[in-house]
Image (spheres, rainbow, N blue to C red):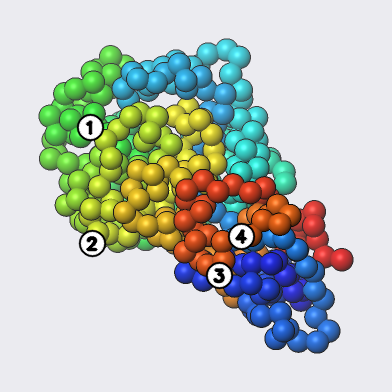
């Protein structure tokens, strides 16, 4: 056991202490959070003067395979136009291969302090498994893109290990019978799906028309046999209105739809950078009075950077009424909760000892309450930061 002693410790959104130790074991788990004067004699100690520690942020949704996408050239053309450009770019010469893109994406996430990231894997090599060092931890979800039943290999479901996560692309790219098969097989396991992202999806589902429907016709894709009044109604009809379903984006869902998801224990991940990229209207999460969504960063195809504190700042700027402590909770504990990763999200006993370390300038007085630290981070306070995990970080034990 070792005792790690920063000057200040933000355990979670509600609790900050000074001169308090994390007592960790050789497996990197926290066994206790103890005031320095209460540490037992003989325990090895390592001090980190001038540092404020928080739990490592969680990005609950990302794509790692589009790091070099020329996204600045695609702004302002609507979702369907963006999809068309993205698909053309993906088959172009000169783009990074999926593994190289994933490595750069993960390096950027690590540099900006992301401890855990969940990613949809649409291309071989985009799971980041070849990436070193080991942070951020990657929860890779194989993404199913099956506009018709003939595009789907049922062996995917038979090969899933217990509790293994899977991803569906979106209602417009998944045949209804495929979605039903996946949700029926999930039985509470995590299934992530892009849903309720934009008005074009809603129009296609409700009317069978609009820019997204036009794009599907142009690409020779069959339209759905039925119409639904909302994306949430579609989700219910294919069996996805159940615990374990993870709705990604959700920025186009209204108050009633968000409450319906929450009542069915369906969780949501919101990607503020992508929402801003498409210049979409303010989402309804706060007005719905449901738990705030976890936060994600999507990809460089629809974002300017892969940075959890950037997403935090954008979410708070868009929806300040929720308060900074609620948004810090969304970035940490809520992200761990929706991903079913119980050992992440806070710095308490039983959690992983992966931390975001803020190095304060000499003479700087840090804000010394949980509320003021969360507020400062949400408002853009950015002292030097570094992601570290014990016992595998370069700053290992003496």
Q: Secondary structure at mark 2?
A: helix
Foreground tag (3 vs 2): 3
Q: Quadrant of residue 199?
A: top left
- Quarter of the picture containing the N terminus is bottom right
| N-terminal label among 3 and 2 | 3
Label 2: how many Cα within 10 Å (few below 14, some 14–19, many 20+): some
Tag 1 near tag 3, CB within 8 Å = no
- Quarter of the picture containing the C terminus is bottom right
Q: Which residue is mark 3?
A: 16
| N-terminal label among 3 and 4 | 3
Residue nearest the viewer, comparing 66 with 282: 282
| N-terminal label among 2 and 4 | 2
Above or below 86: residue 109: below
Foreground tag (4 vs 1): 4
| Inter-mark Cα distance, 4 to 1 | 43 Å
Above or below 255: residue 303: above
Residue at coordinates 55% horizontally, 70% vertically from top-left? 16
Circle number at residue 332: none
| Inter-mark Cα distance, 2 to 1 | 23 Å
Tag 2 near tag 4, CB within 8 Å = no
Q: Which residue is mark 1?
A: 199
Q: Which residue is mark 4?
A: 366
Image coordinates of residue 24 in percent, x first then y, are 70, 72
Circle number at residue 263: 2
């Amino acid at each position: 056991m070792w005792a790690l002693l920063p000057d200040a410790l933000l355990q979670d959104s509600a609790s900050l202490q000074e001169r308090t130790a994390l007592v960790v074991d050789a497996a990197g788990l926290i066994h206790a959070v103890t005031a320095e004067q209460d540490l037992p004699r003989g325990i090895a100690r390592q001090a980190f003067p001038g540092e404020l520690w928080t739990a490592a942020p969680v990005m609950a949704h990302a794509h790692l395979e589009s790091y070099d996408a020329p996204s600045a050239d695609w702004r302002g053309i609507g979702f369907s136009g963006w999809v068309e450009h993205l698909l053309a770019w993906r088959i172009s010469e000169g783009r990074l291969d999926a593994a190289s893109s994933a490595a750069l994406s993960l390096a950027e996430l690590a540099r900006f302090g992301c401890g855990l990231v969940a990613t949809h894997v649409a291309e071989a090599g985009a799971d980041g498994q070849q990436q070193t060092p080991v942070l951020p931890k990657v929860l890779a979800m194989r993404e199913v893109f099956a506009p018709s039943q003939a595009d789907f290999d049922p062996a995917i479901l038979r090969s899933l290990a217990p509790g293994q996560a899977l991803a569906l692309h979106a209602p417009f790219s998944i045949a209804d019978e495929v979605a039903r098969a996946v949700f029926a097989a999930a039985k509470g396991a995590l299934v992530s799906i892009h849903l309720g992202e934009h008005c074009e999806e809603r129009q296609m589902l409700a009317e069978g028309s609009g820019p997204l429907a036009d794009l599907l016709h142009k690409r020779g894709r069959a339209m759905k046999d039925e119409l639904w009044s909302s994306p949430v109604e579609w989700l219910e009809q294919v069996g996805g209105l159940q615990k374990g379903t993870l709705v990604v984006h959700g920025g186009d869902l209204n108050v009633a739809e968000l409450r319906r998801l929450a009542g069915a224990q369906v969780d949501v991940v919101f990607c503020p950078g992508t929402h801003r990229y498409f210049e979409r209207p303010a989402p309804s999460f706060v007005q719905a009075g449901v738990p705030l969504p976890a936060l994600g960063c999507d990809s460089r195809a629809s974002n300017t950077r892969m940075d959890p504190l950037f997403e935090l700042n954008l979410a708070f700027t868009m929806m300040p009424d929720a308060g900074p402590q609620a948004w810090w909770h969304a970035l940490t504990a809520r992200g761990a909760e929706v991903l079913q990763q119980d050992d992440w999200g806070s710095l308490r006993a039983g959690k992983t000892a992966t931390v975001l370390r803020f190095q304060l300038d000499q003479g700087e007085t840090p804000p010394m309450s949980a509320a003021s630290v969360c507020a400062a981070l949400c408002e853009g306070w950015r002292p030097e930061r570094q992601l570290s995990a014990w016992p595998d970080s370069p700053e290992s034990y003496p």
